[in-house]
Amino acid sequence: MSTEERLYSLAAQLKRLEAYMNDLINREATIVRFIQDARLAIDAIRGLDTREGGEDLYTLMPIGIGVYVHAKISTKDKLLVSVGSGIAVEKSREDAIAYIESRVKELESALLSISKQKQELQSRIEGIRGEMNSIVQQMQGQERQMQKG
């Protein structure tokens, strides 16, 4: 393989790795948002029990595209928790919190894995850039020698 072909090959490889890095960054951001949402949900569930004296608890319920309706929470002890594939299961507050916390742990594990992948990928990207710089310098050196000679 000629020097130019090697340079083009490395450039293509670099482009693929950078695209993969962008994908990892997007996944990481999505997971961070899910973790934040889960923690907010836990806080909201715990907040359901803050009213004393059996007062009614009201909230705003989203119905889509930024539109909300006033709603009365009829029970604070049972929650419907989505477990995937359009299936929701009724759980106690404690069980719902435990379920959400277990999901957060899974998401944090995924976040750690993505972080490791990003570090490895960054090392590969830097290695390729270094190799490309060496090739370009070598080509420039050869070009200078040809101009002198």
Image (tube, rainbow, N blue to C red):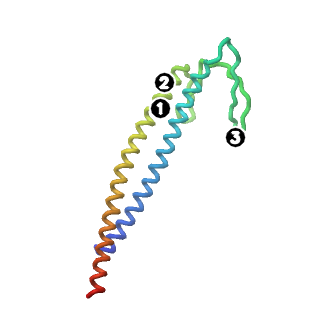
- Judged from this view, the residue extending furthest toward the bottom is 149
Return the x and y of residue 147 as percentages of the image width and height: 30, 86
Per the image, the residue denoted by label 2 is 98
Lower sequence index among marks 1 and 3: 3
Return the x and y of residue 47 as percentages of the image width and height: 60, 22
Residue at disc 2, secondary structure: helix
Query: Which residue is drawn at the image coordinates 68% and 22% (left, top)?
Result: 73
Q: Nearer the viewer, residue 69 or 139?
A: 139
Spatial distance from mark 1 to mark 3, Cα to Cα? 27 Å
Eyeballing the image, is 84 above or below 127? above
Q: Nearer the viewer, residue 124 or 106?
A: 124
Q: Quadrant of residue 45?
A: top right
Identified by mark 2, the residue type is Ala
Spatial distance from mark 3 to mark 2, Cα to Cα? 30 Å
Q: Nearer the viewer, mark 1 or mark 3?
A: 3
Lower sequence index among marks 2 and 1: 2
User: What numbered label is drawn on residue 103?
Assistant: 1
Eyeballing the image, is 120 above or below 77? below
Eyeballing the image, is 109 above or below 140? above
Return the x and y of residue 65 as percentages of the image width and height: 69, 42
Q: Nearer the viewer, residue 89 or 16?
A: 16
Which quadrant would the N terminus be assigned to in this image?
Answer: bottom left
Per the image, the residue denoted by label 3 is 66
> How many residues crowd around disc 3 within 10 Å: few (fewer than 14), some, or many (20 or more)?
few
Lower sequence index among marks 3 and 2: 3
Q: Nearer the viewer, residue 39 or 134?
A: 134
> How many residues crowd around disc 1 within 10 Å: few (fewer than 14), some, or many (20 or more)?
some
